[in-house]
């Protein structure tokens, strides 16, 4: 991407104009994750015109793409060369973009085993609130020149500026994969997943719901086959298994569809994403829970009071996010404690002194 | 390289010292404070010994409460604070401030908690890197990042530098293996970045703090992720008679879908130096040798070693040897791990550089360095973390010869600038510290440097934590004659220059 790229120039012009007349902007990519976070405020600012894969070097394990690049296009380009983003980002619709993936910072089923979006970001180009185009990080694996700004953009929901381009580390597709199913109660499943994770096993993803634990193994052929033999359980056929993991990632499987139906009919029902240490004991909350990430991500479909859910998460060292709901008045995210709240506010001001970008989507009342 | 003569005493230093000592003496036990110059001399530099300065005071607090109190007092007095771990850093990040307090965290050396079920360890910042793996070993676990200095360096220093190691292509950097840090702001407030859960609400500030070289907060406690120790590791040594072939072999391994546990390269001068030192049986005729490691279950390792051997032979290796047992594997690594001490025998002094380039440019940079050897009239031996393109050229010189030192500095800056032009960075893992301030002007635009400075102020408004490091002032960039050159992305013509 060069500075004279017309799409980039038009974004710069819009930010400068917004700064001049103090118009807040709500950055928008494909809109596939517009349900996530607090309500967007400001004039919609479509950044999808800045699109396309800028460079891809399979032998470098690095790809760079502009923010408006469809996520599906990037994944297809990687797949063609036998590579992938190992964290399997959810799309939540065909309009999903690379910029939105970084801004939302959401990772799919393998998060606990392979890391999240942040762990694969190597560099980014940012259009900040002063209308400056800045590059941080780079296209190399190791880089400690200056502060690691590119990784802070992950999950920033547009509060620091427009993520114009991002460079990601990618990895080869695993040579073998297998999915196993076990009948197991929640507490037992959490304990078992943690015990397995402490052993040299190619554990890649897990999901527990309704007394059933499903795990996915990935790695070298020999390692996966040895693990299948060792763990037991019922092996799920390949097509069925990939549909299962895709349904989980895209939230269109039985659990999530059920949750969304309930939200539609009952205003008090919310789908919570509860993030806790992997070993946290079962949370005593009413409602259906689906557990991913070896115990670290717990979905809860419940009409329980927000405070009780937040308290349960906080008590074990985690936090709770209202992921989908009609009513988000209880606040989408768990508020930060001092002095983090102040540092976050100051940091937002450092990138966007005039408050052009919609920081409210991440934390209302900045 | 900026001149920082240790003899220069800033005006008013003695009065300032009296003032600071008086204030801190009221807060910390006498055994925790040093200020007589014979006591503070051991703190005058870190692993980058070319730069030295006497701190006003060295404080060695013993508790978190003392760290908080000390920071509050320094903030009230407007005194800079330079945090320090084991002092093994190679870029002068822990160089004392002559009007500041050096905050040694050496006494924070306790492993607080080892949670086997959760595979985490909570350790104080002064715990040595290797000590974590040693404590975890009985449980079949270890802490993956293994910088070469791991017997001495502390986890706090690793966090400050985002330290890597020879296994980071597969296992990641410090950033990928730390869940949470606890520390104190410049104001002395307790602060926690990250979480034992896998994410946090709001902005994720942990990646900013990791690698920030003590400029954003003082970290006292680190929660690290432990991983299962692989059942087996085997290593291949492959010889090449041509630098380009060796570089292409590295690319071919990755292209084959293999992520080696370690992938290192040494050039001929370095191989000769280490062979003389450790007698590992390296091929002395090779122009370059590659060390390529596989780890995992025995079945997995066999599968991968077979594939690696095939790729290396196909890439034109003249000799390929696979370790037969653990003793031989360690022997293979002993040379690479002893590259620095071995270089010490080649020359009175050496300067270790640290930059990263895209892997495909490995041969290009080696050939460029060979040209620079002629240009600057100095020899250079090269070791690379080839798997991630991180190079460590060791420029050999004699510091007693002022002209050699000068040429060495020019040589080093040339390597860094060439790395940036090849699409790389001026530091892969040693940090900017004081050493690479000039090179930062080449890699970043004035607007980017100003953005870094604004990030610093968001955490530390008065700029008291390790001031003068990492982020050069624009004034300094101008004076050093270092102009930022950016491939394609040129700075805006309508913004006033400096």
Image: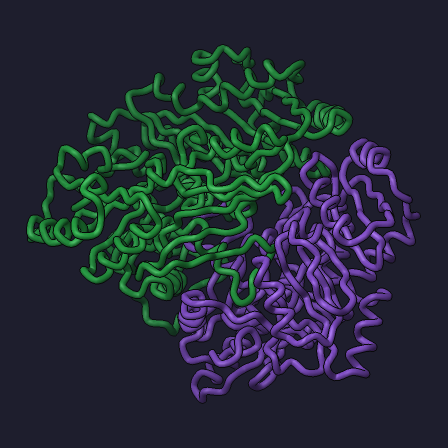
Chain colours: A purple, B green
| Residue B24: percent from left, percent from top | 18, 51
The residue shown at (74%, 61%) is A73
> Which residue shows up at 54% across the image and 14% down it?
B282
Q: Look at 21% across and 62% down and name the residue there.
A: B76
Across and down, in percent, residue B415 comes to 40, 39
Is residue A23 positioned above or below B301 on the image?
A: below
Q: Quadrant of residue B486?
A: bottom left
Residue A348 relative to residue A84: left or right:
left
Name which quarter of the figure residue B464 lies in.
bottom left
Q: Is residue B85 visible?
A: yes
Nearer to the camera, B279 or B373: B279
| Residue A22 at x, y percent in the picture | 45, 87
Q: Report the side of B196 relative to A264 (left or right).
A: left
| Total marks in image | 0
Quadrant where the image shows the C terminus of chain B:
bottom left
Q: Quadrant of residue B50?
A: top left
Residue B446 visible in the shown view: no
Given residues B244 and A27, the one toward you in this image is A27
Compared with residue A184, is residue A29 higher up or lower down, i.e. above or below? below
Name the quadrant of the N terminus of chain B: top left
* Relative to A287, residue B192 above or below: above
Compare residues B368 and B416 and report the one nearer the observer.
B416
Taking the image as shown, residue B64 lies to the left or right of residue A361, namely left
* Front-most of residues B249 and B153: B153
Residue at the extreme bottom of the image, as rendered: A21
Q: Is residue B172 left or right of residue B270?
A: right
- The location of residue B491, given as percent across then percent down, is 42, 65
């Amino acid at each position: 991407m060069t500075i004279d790229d017309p799409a980039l120039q038009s974004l710069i012009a819009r930010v400068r104009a917004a700064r001049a007349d103090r118009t807040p902007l709500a950055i928008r990519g494909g809109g596939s994750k517009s349900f996530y976070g607090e309500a967007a405020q400001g004039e919609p600012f479509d950044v999808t015109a800045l699109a396309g894969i800028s460079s891809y070097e399979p032998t470098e394990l690095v790809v760079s793409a502009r923010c408006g690049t469809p996520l599906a296009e990037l994944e297809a380009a990687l797949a063609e060369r036998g590579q992938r983003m190992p964290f399997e980002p959810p799309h939540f619709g065909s309009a999903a973009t690379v910029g939105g993936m970084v801004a939302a910072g959401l990772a799919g089923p393998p998060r606990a085993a392979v890391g999240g979006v942040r762990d694969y970001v190597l560099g980014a180009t940012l259009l900040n609130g002063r209308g400056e185009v800045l590059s941080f990080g780079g296209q190399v694996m190791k880089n400690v020149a200056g502060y690691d700004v590119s990784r802070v953009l992950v999950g920033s929901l547009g509060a620091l500026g427009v993520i114009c381009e991002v460079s990601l580390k990618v990895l080869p597709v695993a040579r073998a994969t297998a999915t196993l199913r076990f009948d197991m109660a929640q507490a037992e499943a959490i304990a078992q997943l943690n015990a397995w994770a402490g052993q040299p096993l190619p554990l890649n993803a897990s999901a527990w719901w309704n007394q059933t634990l499903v795990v996915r193994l990935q790695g070298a052929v020999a390692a996966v086959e040895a693990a299948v033999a060792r763990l037991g359980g019922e092996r799920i056929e390949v097509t069925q298994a990939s549909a299962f993991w895709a349904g989980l990632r895209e939230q269109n499987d039985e659990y999530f569809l059920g949750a969304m139906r309930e939200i539609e009919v009952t205003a008090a029902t919310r789908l919570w994403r509860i993030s806790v240490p992997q070993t946290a004991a079962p949370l005593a909350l009413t409602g259906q829970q689906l557990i991913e990430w070896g115990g670290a991500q717990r979905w809860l479909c419940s009409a329980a009071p927000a405070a009780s859910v937040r308290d349960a998460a906080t008590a074990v060292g985690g936090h709770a996010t209202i992921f989908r709901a009609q009513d988000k008045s209880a606040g989408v995210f768990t508020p930060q404690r001092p002095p983090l709240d102040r540092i976050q506010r100051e940091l937002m001001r450092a990138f966007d002194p005039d408050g052009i970008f919609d920081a409210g989507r991440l934390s209302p009342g900045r | 390289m900026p001149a920082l003569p240790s003899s220069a005493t800033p005006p008013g230093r003695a009065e300032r010292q009296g003032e600071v000592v008086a204030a801190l003496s009221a807060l910390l036990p006498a055994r925790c404070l040093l200020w007589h110059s014979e006591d503070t001399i051991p703190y005058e530099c870190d692993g980058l010994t070319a730069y030295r300065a006497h701190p006003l005071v060295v404080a060695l607090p013993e508790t978190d409460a003392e760290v908080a109190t000390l920071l509050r007092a320094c903030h009230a007095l407007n005194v800079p604070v330079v945090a320090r771990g084991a002092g093994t850093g190679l870029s002068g990040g822990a160089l004392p401030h002559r009007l500041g307090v050096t905050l040694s965290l050496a006494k924070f050396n306790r492993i607080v908690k080892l949670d086997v079920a959760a595979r985490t360890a909570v350790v104080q910042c002064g715990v040595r890197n290797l000590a974590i793996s040693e404590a975890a070993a009985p449980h079949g676990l270890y802490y993956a990042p293994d910088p070469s200095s791991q017997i001495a360096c502390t986890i706090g220093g690793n966090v400050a530098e985002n330290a890597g190691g020879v296994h980071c292509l597969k296992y990641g950097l410090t950033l990928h293996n730390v869940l949470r840090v606890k520390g104190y702001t410049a104001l002395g407030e307790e602060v926690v970045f990250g979480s034992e859960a896998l994410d946090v609400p709001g902005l994720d500030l942990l990646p900013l703090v990791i690698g920030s070289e003590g400029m954003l907060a003082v970290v006292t406690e680190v929660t690290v992720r432990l991983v299962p120790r692989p059942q087996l590791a085997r290593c291949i040594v492959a010889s090449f008679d041509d630098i380009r072939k060796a570089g292409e072999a590295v690319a071919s391994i990755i292209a084959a879908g293999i992520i080696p546990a370690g992938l290192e390269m040494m050039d001929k001068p370095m191989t000769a130096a280490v062979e003389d030192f450790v007698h590992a049986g390296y091929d002395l005729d090779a122009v370059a040798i590659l060390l390529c490691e596989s780890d995992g279950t025995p079945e997995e390792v066999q599968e991968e070693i077979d594939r690696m051997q095939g790729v290396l032979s196909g890439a034109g290796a003249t000799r390929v040897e696979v370790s037969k047992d653990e003793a031989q594997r360690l022997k293979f690594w002993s040379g690479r791990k002893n590259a620095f001490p071995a270089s010490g025998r080649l020359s009175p002094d050496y300067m270790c550089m640290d930059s990263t380039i895209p892997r495909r440019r490995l041969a290009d940079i080696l050939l460029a360095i060979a040209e620079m050897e002629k240009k600057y009239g100095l020899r250079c031996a090269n070791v690379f973390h080839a798997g991630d393109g991180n190079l460590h050229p060791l420029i050999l010189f004699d510091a007693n010869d002022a002209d050699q030192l000068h040429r060495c500095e020019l040589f080093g800056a040339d390597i860094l600038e060439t790395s940036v032009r090849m699409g790389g960075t001026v530091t892969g893992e040693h940090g900017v510290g004081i050493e690479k301030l000039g090179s930062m002007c080449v890699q970043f635009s004035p607007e980017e440097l100003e953005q870094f400075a604004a990030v610093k102020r968001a955490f530390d408004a008065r700029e008291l934590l390790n001031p003068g490091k990492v982020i050069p002032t624009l004034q300094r960039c101008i004076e050093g004659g270092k102009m930022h050159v950016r491939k394609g992305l040129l700075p805006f013509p309508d913004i006033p220059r400096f």
